Image (tube, rainbow, N blue to C red):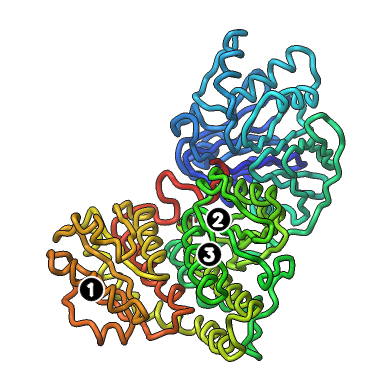
Amino acid sequence: MCGIVGIVGKEPVAERLVDALRRLEYRGYDSAGVATIHDGTMERRRAEGKLFNLEKVLDGEPLPGTIGIAHTRWATHGVPNVTNAHPHFVEGVAVVHNGIIENFSELKEELIAEGAVFESQTDTEVVAHLLAKYTREGLDHQAAMLAMLNRVHGAYALVVMFADDAGTIMAARSGPPLAVGHGKGEMFLGSDAIALSPFTNEITYLVDGDCAVLTAKGAKIMDFSGRPVTRKSQISQAATFLVDKGNHRHFMEKEIYEQPEIISHALSHYVDFAENVVKQPDAAIDFGSVSGLAISACGTAYLSGLVGKYWFERYARLPVEIDVASEFRYREIPLSKSQAALFISQSGETADTLASLRYCKDEGLKIGAIVNVKESTIARESDAIFPILAGPEIGVASTKAFTCQLAVLAALSIAAGRARGTITAEGERAMVKHLVEMPRIMSRVLNEVQPQIEALSREIARFKDVLYLGRGTSFPLAMEGALKLKEISYIHAEGYAAGELKHGPIALIDENMPVIVIAPHDRFFEKTVSNMQEVAARGGKIIFITDERGAAASKLETMATIVLPNVDEIISPMIFALPIQLLAYHTAVFMGTDVDQPRNLAKSVTVE
Ligand code: F6R
C-alpha cells in the first residue's frame, strides 16, 4: 500500500528516486510523484496512473536537486488523480505517506477552523498542515515533526522534507515498514530494502514509534518524545535478487514457470534429500508438545493456511484454529499458552496479519512466521521464522509464494507428525520422497498442460461467472482458483466445497456458468464425481481438472478435461495449483487486462 522513498545525497536524485519507485510499484500504482529541492526552491512533479506517466512528465520538465522524496500511491482517501498524488506541499513542507491517518477528519476540521486551506481529499495533507503550523509557531523542524507525530493516530510511514533545509530528510514509522539505507556520503529511505538495493545494502529497519533525521552524514533515530534510540544496521540480501522478467511477457508468467526450481530450493531448507527425512524446523516452536495451532493470514496466504490445517490435523493430529486475519484479530478467540500460532504472509507486512500476530503474542503463544521476506516486520516479531524462499514476487497475484507456502506447510506438518509420534519413520520417508519428486512433476505439468489451458482460456473469457468446486485440500484450492481468476481477469468467480453445492450454489447452474471441478483420484473422488453429475444434469458446463486415474474412472461429458499425472495426496495441492494459475493467467492475457498490476490491487496491504 503505497511505496515511499527519500534520498539526501550528492548527485541529482530525481532519476534515482524514480528508479527506486519502480521497485516499489507493486505497492500501488494509482499515481506517482517526486519532489526535490534545488537552489532553495522545492518543486514537485506528479502524475495519475502508473510510473511511466510520471517519467513522461519528468522528461518534459526535469527536476534538478540532490535531495528529494517520492511516492507511488494505492489510493485510500481520495480518488486517484494528480491533486491527491503525493508529495503534498504546504508552505515549504513536503510529505509522502504510506498508511492511514485515522484521526484526520478531526485534525482537518481543527486546521480549517484555524484558516488552513486543503487542496486534496487525502488524509496525508493534515500531516503537511500540522508541520507547517508548528513551524509557523516557531518550532524548529525536528520539534515540529515530534509535535505532529504526537497528534496523528493510525498506521503510517512518513517521509518529510522542508524547503529551507536542503540537507535533511525526516521520517517516522508507526505500522507500515520503513528502511534507512546507508550510503557513502548519502543516505536513503524506502518502504523496503529492495527499493534501495541499487544504492546500498546496508539497511537499518525503523521500528514502530521511531522518528529518523537523515543528513548526508548519517541517521539520528529517536522515539516520538525525542529520546535517542539505537537501531542496528544489517546487510540486506535484497540486492542479490534480480528483478527482471527474463523472456516472459509478464512477471506472473515468469513466476509461474519458476516454481519447480524455486520449490526445490525452498525444500532443501526443510528436507534432508539424502535421508528422505524432514530437517528439524526452527526449535523455537516445539510441535511435539503444543496442544494446537492457530493460523491466520489474508487472501492467498490464508488459503495456503487452510490446506495446512488439513495436513496438521491429519498427519500430526494437531487441532488447528484458522481464520482470515481481519476476523481473527477482532474475534477475541480464547487461546491457550500451550498453543502455537503461525502467520503466513508473502510480504511479511500485511497489517491484519501483523495485528493477529500481536494479539497471539499478548496471549502468550509462541509465534511462527511463514514469510517470504525474512527481514519483514512479521518475521522480526516472531519467535520462529520459516522462510518460504520464493525470491521476490513481483506479479501482484501470488503464484510461487502460494506453492512455496504449501511446500513449507507440508514439511512442517510432517515434522510435527514425527515429533508427535503420529507418523512412522517409514511414513515420513514415503512422504518426503513425494516432496522430493515434486519439482520434476511440476515442470512436466507446466509444459504439458499449457497449450490446452491457453486454448481453454479463450472459452472461459466468454463467461461472466465461473464456479470452482473441490473437496478436502482441493476445497481451498478451488477458492484459490476463483480468487486468481477474479483478481486478474475480472471474471466473477467463486470457490465452493463440492459438498456445499446443493445447499445453494446449484441454483446458479446453467449453460452460462462453467463449473471447474478440481478432483484428483483421492479419498473424495467418488463424492466429487457425484456433485459433477448434479451439475451435468442441470446443463452446467464442466471443466474437469483431474489425474490419469480420475480421467479413466469418470465417464462424464465435459467441456474440457485437464489430466495431470497421478501424484500422492501430500503434493497434489502444489501440482493442482499449476493449471488454475495458468488458466487465470491465460484468460487475463486473452482479455487484455493488466496481468501484473490488476486494477485496484496492491501487493503489500499495510492498512486494515
Ligand atoms: C492474491 C494475493 C493476496 C495476498 C494477500 C496477503 O493473489 O496475492 O490475496 O495473498 O494480500 O498478502 P501477504 O501474503 O503479503 O500477507
Residue at which label 1 appears: 530
Res. 262 in view: no
In the foreground, 163 or 84: 84
Q: Residue at x 55, y 55 (%)?
A: 296
Tell me which label, 3 or 2, sits earlier in the chain. Answer: 2
In the foreground, 174 or 315: 315
Give, as a three-letter code, the residue at label 3. Ala
Helix, strand, or loop for circle 2? Answer: strand
Helix, strand, or loop for circle 3? Answer: helix
In the picture, the disc for residue 401 is 3
Residue depth check, mark 1 versus mark 2: number of the one nearer the observer: 1
x and y percentages locating residue 556 in the rendered image: 18, 78
Q: Residue at x 36, y 71 (%)?
A: 579
Q: Mark 1 near mark 3, Cβ–Cβ under 8 Å?
A: no
Residue depth check, mark 3 versus mark 2: number of the one nearer the observer: 2
Q: Mark 1 near mark 2, Cβ–Cβ under 8 Å?
A: no
Quadrant location of the N terminus in the rendered image: top right
Residue 282 picture quarter? bottom right
Q: Is residue 465 left or right of residue 234?
A: left
x and y percentages locating residue 177 in the rendered image: 66, 45
Tell me which label, 1 or 3, sits earlier in the chain. Answer: 3
Label 3 and label 2: CA atoms lie apart by 16 Å
Number of callouts: 3
Is the distance from the Cβ of mark 3 to the nearest ligand 1 atom less than 8 Å?
yes
- Up the image or down, 566 lies above or below 574; here it is below
In the foreground, 525 or 150: 525
Residue at which label 2 appears: 296
x and y percentages locating residue 248 in the rendered image: 45, 67
Q: Residue at x 54, y 46 (%)?
A: 605
